[in-house]
Image (spheres, grey):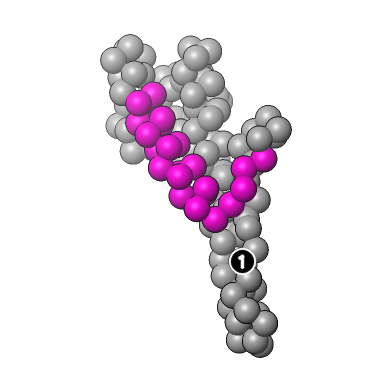
Amino acid sequence: MNKAFIEEMATRLQSERESLTKELSSFTVKDSKAKVADYTTKFEEYGDDEDENASEVADYSNKLSLESALEKEVRDIDSAIIRIKEGSYGICKYCNTEINEDRLRARPTSTSCIACKKTLTQEV
Ligand SMILES: [Zn+2]
């Protein structure tokens, strides 16, 4: 894997991480003691009317699903950054060959090559 490409991916991962955590910080509180990225959605009170209570709950549940989706992305990015540091970035975790650069450009957090991914998806 060439160095320039890995640096390009590292920069993209960092900036993606920044925008994700920025979005998360608008409606969650970060657990600073957790070892992995861990966020808790804030419950916002709109008022005491029945419809206000209903929208509080609806918004909260939407935010919860957004939280878990974003949190998962941040965790994937964090493990990709760790792989870059360890020198194992871009290597398929199943067959140990280099993952295609186009695939990594499309999805910088990929951990498997297209061939292995296909085999896995067909098995399901
Ligand atoms: Zn593979």
Residue 95 seen by the camera:
no
Image position, residue 86 (x, y; %): 53, 13
Residue 11, image quadrant: top left
User: Tag count in the figure?
Assistant: 1
Q: Main secondary structure of the magenta part?
A: helix
Q: Which residues are magenta?
A: 9-31
Report if residue 18 lies within the magenta region. yes
Judge by depth and name the residue closer to the eye, 50 or 57: 50
x, y percent for residue 124: 60, 49
CB of mark 1 near ligand 1 (< 8 Å): no
Q: Quadrant of residue 43?
A: bottom right
Task: Kindly give the residue lying farthest to the front in the view shown.
Answer: 47
Identity of the residue furthest to the right in this view: 33
The image quarter in which residue 49 lies: bottom right
Task: Give amino acid for label 1.
Answer: Glu
Name which residue lies at 70% across and 33% down: 33
Percent position of residue 34, x then y: 70, 34
Residue that badge 1 annotates = 44
Drawn side of residue 107 relative to residue 43, left or right: left
Please report the residue visible at 65 percent of the width from the left and 51 percent of the height from the top. Answer: 40
Q: Which residue shows up at 33% across the image and 38% down it?
A: 106
Relative to 12, residue 53 above or below = below
Per the image, is 16 magenta?
yes
